[in-house]
Image (cartoon, grey):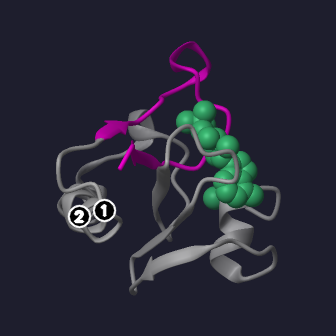
């Protein structure tokens, strides 16, 4: 998946403002933030979209969801935040590596 920009970020081939990383998940700031805080939570494994996930992705999907409120709070969004997962061209997806947007204003 050498053409995937988020795989390149995972591989360290292009820079990103990383905020969290473990064996399965990487989180970094969106390059064009839509709010004071705008994080992208991604699985390190390449999967095109939510529509391409299967039971084998259940654990990493769970990790992404459970990380969202923790990282939001750590970035000053204790009062609340928005999440979005755009899926497919019709869903406004532009980068075809699954990602969860977490964003909000302080
Ligand atoms: P989506 O429309 O859900 O596919 O959103 C893709 C998001 O990725 C957009 O909000 C972009 O600003 C963001 N993005 C694209 N390239 C980069 C990059 N190199 N580093 C960080 N965020 C990026
Ligand atoms: Zn990828």
- Badges 2 and 1: C-beta atoms under 8 Å apart? yes
Residue 49 relative to residue 59: left or right: right
Q: Residue 29 appears at what percent x and percent y? A: 57, 61
Task: Identify the secondary structure beneath mark 2.
Answer: helix
Q: Residue at x 81, y 79 (%)?
A: 13
**Residue 98 lies in the magenta stretch:** yes
Res. 76 mark: 1
Q: Which residues are magenta?
A: 82-106
Q: Quadrant of residue 5?
A: bottom right
Q: Residue 26 appears at what percent x and percent y? A: 48, 73
Viewer-proximal residue, 35 or 47?
35
In the rendered image, the vertical position of residue 7 relative to residue 35, given as above or below:
below
Residue 4 relative to residue 36: left or right: right
Res. 102 mark: none
In the rendered image, the vertical position of residue 12 relative to residue 43, given as above or below:
below
Q: On the image, numbered disc 2 is attached to which residue?
A: 73
Q: Is residue 96 visible?
A: no
Q: Quadrant of ligand 2?
A: bottom right
Task: Identify the secondary structure beneath mark 1.
Answer: loop
Q: Residue at x 27, y 58 (%)?
A: 68
Q: Residue 22 appears at what percent x and percent y? A: 39, 85
Q: Is residue 41 visible?
A: yes
How far apart, in angstroms, are the residues tagged by discs 2 and 1? 5 Å
Q: Residue at x 47, y 30 (%)?
A: 86
């Amino acid at each position: 998946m050498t053409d995937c920009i988020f795989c390149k970020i995972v591989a360290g081939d292009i820079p990103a403002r990383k905020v969290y990383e473990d064996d399965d998940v990487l989180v970094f700031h969106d390059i064009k933030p839509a709010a004071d805080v705008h994080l992208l939570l991604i699985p390190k494994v390449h999967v095109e979209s939510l529509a391409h996930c299967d039971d084998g992705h259940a654990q990493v999907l769970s990790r992404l969801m459970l990380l969202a409120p923790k990282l939001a709070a750590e970035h000053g969004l204790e009062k609340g935040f928005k999440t979005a997962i755009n899926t497919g061209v019709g869903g406004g997806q532009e980068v075809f590596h699954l990602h969860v947007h977490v964003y909000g204003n302080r």
